[in-house]
Image (cartoon, rainbow, N blue to C red):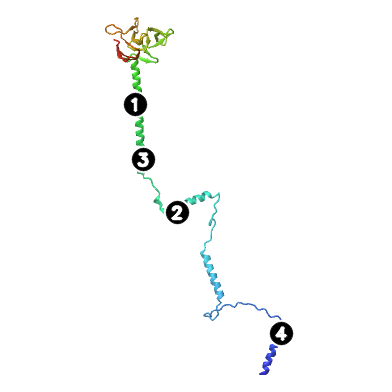
């Protein structure tokens, strides 16, 4: 037993000397696979490899669930070339969101009956305006006609007379007018449009107007002594002009100056500055 222990000690000493003279060997780290219990066949199961295989199968399953993007899919950057298209798309999306949120029937729809009512009201307003304008125009025309009639009556009411400019009248194609001579005297001049105008007769006073009744020229005149009278001349005769007289043969006259002379049928209504009105009968 002693010998064996000594031999062991000697061997250990030799081993110590041997290791002392050489460097210690490098230790390698070797991963030891984890082992589970044996399988049904009796072989041990490599847990690490099983995990790797399971992870590989899971990755393949996830890859099968993903869709590959084709050309034109994915995000698009808006630039000048597609700005209008992007705006249209945004507007369409906004309208879609509005319709989705509020419904398609939420937009206001104009009732056709309301349109008919508005059009009818507009027509009534136009008719009323037209009626008002027509009435106003008709009144103006009536006033103008009345004024024209009064002016014609003031000069003459005979159907044989026509009022011409500047107080003239016409009879049988001849125009008769009042004319003042260079010496200040007044005359009645006739113009047939063919021959030179000719003096028909002279007026003693200052004529107010020239009237005609049938074929008689009538001149209401103011005199220098502050009175007035009416001169008459029968056309187509060789008689001289005369002053109109009453039934007693007295000259019809008045005081002041003549302010109006209106011929009504065969009577001249003369109004003077005193306010008096005198009827002068021509027959």
Which structural element holds mark 4? helix
Which residue is located at x 50 percent, y 50 percent?
A: 87
Spatial separation of the CA atoms under disc 3 and disc 2: 35 Å
Q: Is residue 193 left or right of residue 267?
A: right
- Label 3: how many residues lie within 10 Å, few (<14), some (14-19) or many (20+)? few
Indicate which label's residue lies in the foreground, 2 or 4: 4
Which residue is located at x 42 percent, y 54 percent?
A: 101
Q: Are marks 4 and 1 in contact (CB under 8 Å)?
A: no
Whichever of callouts 2 and 4 sits on the residue coming sooner in the sequence is 4
| Residue that numbered label 4 is attached to | 18
Work out which residue is located at the far left of the displayed protein and give it.
248
Spatial separation of the CA atoms under disc 4 and disc 3: 124 Å
- Label 1: how many residues lie within 10 Å, few (<14), some (14-19) or many (20+)? few
- Label 2: how many residues lie within 10 Å, few (<14), some (14-19) or many (20+)? few
| Residue that numbered label 2 is attached to | 97
Spatial separation of the CA atoms under disc 4 and disc 1: 152 Å
Which structural element holds mark 3? helix
Which residue is located at x 37 percent, y 15 percent?
A: 163
Whichever of callouts 1 and 2 sits on the residue coming sooner in the sequence is 2
The answer to which quarter of the image holds residue 154 is top left
The quarter of the image holding the N terminus is bottom right
Residue 51 at what x, y percent from top left? 54, 73
Spatial separation of the CA atoms under disc 2 and disc 4: 90 Å
Residue 149 at what x, y percent from top left? 34, 19
| Residue that numbered label 1 is attached to | 139
């Amino acid at each position: 037993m002693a010998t064996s222990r000594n031999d062991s000690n000697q061997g250990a000493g030799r081993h110590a000397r041997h290791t002392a003279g050489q460097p210690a060997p490098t230790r390698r780290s070797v991963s030891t696979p984890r082992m589970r219990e044996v399988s049904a066949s009796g072989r041990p199961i490599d847990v690490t490899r099983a995990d790797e295989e399971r992870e590989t199968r899971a990755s393949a399953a996830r890859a099968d669930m993903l869709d590959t993007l084709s050309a034109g899919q994915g995000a698009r950057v808006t630039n000048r070339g597609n700005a209008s298209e992007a705006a249209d798309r945004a507007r369409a999306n906004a309208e879609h969101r509005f319709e989705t949120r509020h419904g398609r029937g939420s937009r206001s729809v104009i009732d056709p009956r309301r349109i008919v009512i508005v059009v009818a009201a507009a027509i009534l307003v136009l008719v009323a305006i037209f009626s008002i304008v027509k009435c106003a125009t008709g009144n103006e025309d009536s006033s103008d006609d009345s004024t024209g009639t009064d002016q014609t009556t003031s000069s003459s009411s005979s159907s044989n007379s026509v009022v011409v400019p500047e107080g003239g009248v016409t009879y049988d194609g001849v125009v008769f007018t009042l004319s003042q001579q260079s010496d200040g005297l007044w005359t009645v001049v006739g113009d047939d449009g063919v021959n030179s105008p000719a003096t028909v007769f002279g007026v003693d006073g200052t004529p107010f107007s020239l009237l005609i009744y049938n074929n008689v020229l009538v001149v209401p005149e103011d005199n220098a002594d502050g009175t007035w009278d009416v001169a008459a001349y029968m056309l187509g005769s060789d008689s001289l002009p005369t002053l109109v007289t009453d039934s007693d043969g007295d000259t019809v006259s008045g005081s002041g100056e003549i302010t109006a002379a209106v011929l009504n049928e065969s009577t001249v209504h003369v109004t003077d500055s005193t306010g008096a009105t005198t009827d002068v009968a021509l027959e």
